[in-house]
Amino acid sequence: TLEAAREARAKVFGAGTDDDEFKTPAKTEMPFSVASKKVFEGAMEASRALGMNYVGPEHVVLSLMEEPSGEKARAVLAAAEVDFETINEHTASKLSAEVEENSGKAEAESGKKRRAAA
């Protein structure tokens, strides 16, 4: 829940952090920290390595688990009692199934095109 996420954040960053920073109007450009940028770059690399043309939350999770500079984010997840091993296994399984499904679709499309050309 949102409240549980706020409590987890407070455990890591302290109770002095209030939500005022989240109530200001959104800017057109979000200033990400260096660590955040590295996590997003890792997510893009994970997506490309799997032959995917998008970056989804699952790629961000994989990158977050691997990126050494993502320790504060992992601390928030740990404070929320997230089981990293289960998350890693579930994410890898989901992506593997998606890669297999997409490669099967690509093969079927290729076969249709060959038959149509013949």
Image: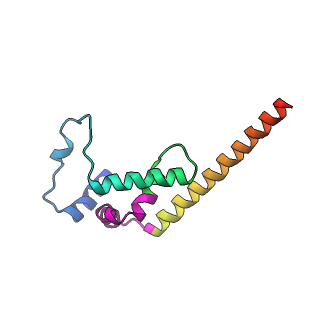
Whether the magenta-drawn stretch holds residue 81 is answered as yes
Q: Position of residue 85 (x, y in %)?
A: 47, 69
Left or right of 35: which side holds 51?
right
Q: Position of residue 87 (x, y in %)?
A: 47, 63
Q: Residue furthest right?
A: 118
Quadrant for residue 7, please give it: bottom left
Q: Is 52 drawn above or below residue 39 in the view shown?
A: above
In front: 61, or 4?
61
Quadrant for residue 94, please give it: bottom right
Magenta part mainly helix, strand or loop?
Answer: helix
Q: Position of residue 92 (x, y in %)?
A: 54, 60
Residue that appears at 30% across and 62% down = 76
Q: Residue furthest left?
A: 16
Q: Residue furthest front?
A: 117
Left or right of 24: which side holds 91?
right
Left or right of 47: which side holds 70?
left
Q: Is 15 drawn above or below residue 112 in the view shown?
A: below
Whether the magenta-drawn stretch holds residue 66 is answered as yes
Range of magenta residues: 62-84
Residue that appears at 50% across and 43% down = 54
- The number of numbered discs placed on residues in the rendered structure image is 0
Q: Quadrant of the C terminus?
A: top right
